[in-house]
């Protein structure tokens, strides 16, 4: 299809997809993320009963593909079990695809053996779709960019680090990975009567990764940043980026980070020295943007594939929580650009776990680029530039963030999408695991977060991360907010 015709086709289908992905014009989207194990353990009808009775859910985001435990499997081992489902941990969890695999859609990839061995023979969409449709509930396939290192042929899709070693992550510019993602999308869209697809990648480029600029980033090896594979090098050259100069810049950045973590302070301090590196090696940021643009190209490929398969399928993305902490990552999340291939966006606004994660980000960033700034001052700086007002460094892991954080983030995202038809569905935290002594979700906190999202102009909310770790009382807190708002 010529480019001009393809653009016209996609634009024409966008408004139809918006209505398809949203329950009704006069209703708000009330979604929940749920994995196959919940339906296996508790039964399809009882689970759907809980969703509708407790939280007035009208849209299911079913985890159809992942190798991670964040959106599939039972409760993470070591965390308290919820008050429903089997009262045990699935210690043999593997992950993969929780639907049938139709080989005709995977001709353009060497990654073909990815059926989840968990719940052998169970196709979650075949099991749930009929019951959901009878209840008037929409179904969206929710899949993510998380893999294992022991899968057949996976090494051929993996990124290469600064020294040419394989990473555990996959490369967006690798045609075999692109072929897998588009094949999976087409399989879902053509084989099932679904209403949408949502894909998420909780990753960032080499620059932020080298600096440890994320929650949990303090242990990242600055020599393992990605991607420097043949496909990324080819794309870089096409963009006029000197590959050797980029590599030299990242080698210098690796040394800077290792010295900073070893408390070897440069004569001009950490921040000034980092800027000197960026000025001397502008390829550092060029390579970072190469990675970000490659992620956007992947969005576009999934979007186009879904629309060609069935124009009514809504397509959207999960935007990582790092968006609330790292100003560099937020700068890369240009919502106007992303909206061009998005019917909806789930932007993570997990209020309860945000305190623990922000503290982790500050601790990590304060050991590299902000090495001369005390942690509390650094937190205050981030509060100012990220438009956030919460408690101090010592308190936030134990208190979490307030509902006001959800309100501010929703308002900011709504303004960022100004003029776009993209639906905004904030991700709301219900019992996402935190440290033993740190903040835990409550029914009131859940209620207040949902109220704040809608007060700030959300088109819906997505209750996250997964039903199998949620307490029913906290799920009911979301339902209380829905009733209070008159959406039930």
Image (tube, helix red, strand yellow):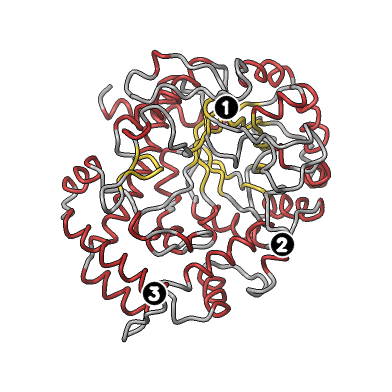
Query: How would you rate the neighbour count of disc 2 (Cα within 10 Å): few for under 14, some for 14-19, many for 20 or more?
Result: some
Query: How would you rate the neighbour count of disc 3 (Cα within 10 Å): few for under 14, some for 14-19, many for 20 or more?
Result: many
Mark 1 lies on a secondary structure that is: helix
In the picture provided, is 64 more to the left or to the right than 164? right
- Answer above or below: position of 415 versus 172: below
Q: Residue furthest bottom?
A: 267
Question: If the image is split into quadrants, where does the C terminus sit?
Answer: top right
- Answer above or below: position of 11 versus 349: above
Camera-near label (2 vs 3) is: 3
Taking the spot 43% from the left edge, 49% from the top edge, the residue there is 336
Task: Kindly identify which residue carries mark 2.
Answer: 438
Q: Earlier in the sequence, mark 1 or mark 2?
A: 1
User: Residue 363: x and y, percent?
Assistant: 53, 70
Q: Earlier in the sequence, mark 3 or mark 1?
A: 1
Task: Kindly identify which residue carries mark 3.
Answer: 260
Q: Earlier in the sequence, mark 2 or mark 3?
A: 3
Taking the spot 60% from the left edge, 44% from the top edge, the residue there is 425
User: Residue 267: x and y, percent?
Assistant: 31, 86
User: Residue 406: x and y, percent?
Assistant: 65, 57
Asked if the residues shown at circle 2 and circle 3 are in contact, with their CB atoms under 8 angstroms apart, the answer is no
Taking depth in this image into account, of 20 and 33 the one nearest to the observer is 33
When asked about the image quadrant of residue 193, the answer is top right
Asked if the residues shown at circle 1 and circle 2 are in contact, with their CB atoms under 8 angstroms apart, the answer is no
Taking depth in this image into account, of 453 and 131 the one nearest to the observer is 131
Task: Kindly identify which residue carries mark 1.
Answer: 20
Mark 3 lies on a secondary structure that is: helix
Question: If the image is split into quadrants, where does the N terminus sit?
Answer: top left
Mark 2 lies on a secondary structure that is: loop
Q: CA distance from mark 2 to mark 3?
A: 29 Å
């Amino acid at each position: 299809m010529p480019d001009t015709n393809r653009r016209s086709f996609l634009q024409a289908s966008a408004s139809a997809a918006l209505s398809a992905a949203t329950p009704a014009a006069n209703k708000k989207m009330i979604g929940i993320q749920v994995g196959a194990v919940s339906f296996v353990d508790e039964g399809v009808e009882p689970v759907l009963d809980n969703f509708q009775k407790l939280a007035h859910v009208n849209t299911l985001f079913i985890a159809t593909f992942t190798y991670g435990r964040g959106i599939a499997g039972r409760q993470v081992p070591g965390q308290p079990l919820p008050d429903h489902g089997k009262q045990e941990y699935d210690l043999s969890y593997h992950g993969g695809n929780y639907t049938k695999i139709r080989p005709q859609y995977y001709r353009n990839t060497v990654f073909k053996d990815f059926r989840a061995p968990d719940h052998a023979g169970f196709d979650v969409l075949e099991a749930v779709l009929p019951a959901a449709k009878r209840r008037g509930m929409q179904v969206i396939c929710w899949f993510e960019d998380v893999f294992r290192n022991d899968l057949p042929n996976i090494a051929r899709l993996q990124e290469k680090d600064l020294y040419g070693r394989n990473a555990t992550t996959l490369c967006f510019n690798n045609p075999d990975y692109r072929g897998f993602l588009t094949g999976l999308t087409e399989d879902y869209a053509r084989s099932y009567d679904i209403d949408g697809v949502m894909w998420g990648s909780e990753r960032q480029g080499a620059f932020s990764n080298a600096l440890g600029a994320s929650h949990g980033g303090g242990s990242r090896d600055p020599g393992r940043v990605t991607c420097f594979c043949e496909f990324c090098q080819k794309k870089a050259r096409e963009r006029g980026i000197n590959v050797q100069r980029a590599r030299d810049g990242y080698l210098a950045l690796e040394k800077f980070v290792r010295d900073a973590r070893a408390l070897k302070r440069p004569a001009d301090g950490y921040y000034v020295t980092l800027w000197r590196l960026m000025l001397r090696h502008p390829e550092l940021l060029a390579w970072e943007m190469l990675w970000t643009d490659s992620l956007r190209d992947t969005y576009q490929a999934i979007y186009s594939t879904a629309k060609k398969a069935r124009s009514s399928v809504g397509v959207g993305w999960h935007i990582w929580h790092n968006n609330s902490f790292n100003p560099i990552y937020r700068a890369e999340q240009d919502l106007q650009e992303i909206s061009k291939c998005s019917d909806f966006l789930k932007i993570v606004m997990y209020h309860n776990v945000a305190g623990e994660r922000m503290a982790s980000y500050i601790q990590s960033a304060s050991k590299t680029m902000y090495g001369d700034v005390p942690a509390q001052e650094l937190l205050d700086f981030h509060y100012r530039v990220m438009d956030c007002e919460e408690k101090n460094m010592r308190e936030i892991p134990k208190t979490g963030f307030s509902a006001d954080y959800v309100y501010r983030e929703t308002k900011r995202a709504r303004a960022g999408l100004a003029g776009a038809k993209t639906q905004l569905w904030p991700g709301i935290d219900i019992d996402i695991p935190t440290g033993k002594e740190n903040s835990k979700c409550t029914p009131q906190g859940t209620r207040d977060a949902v109220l704040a999202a809608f007060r700030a102009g959300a088109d819906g909310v997505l209750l996250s991360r997964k039903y199998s770790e949620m307490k029913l009382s906290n799920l009911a807190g979301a339902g209380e907010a829905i009733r209070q708002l008159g959406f039930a």
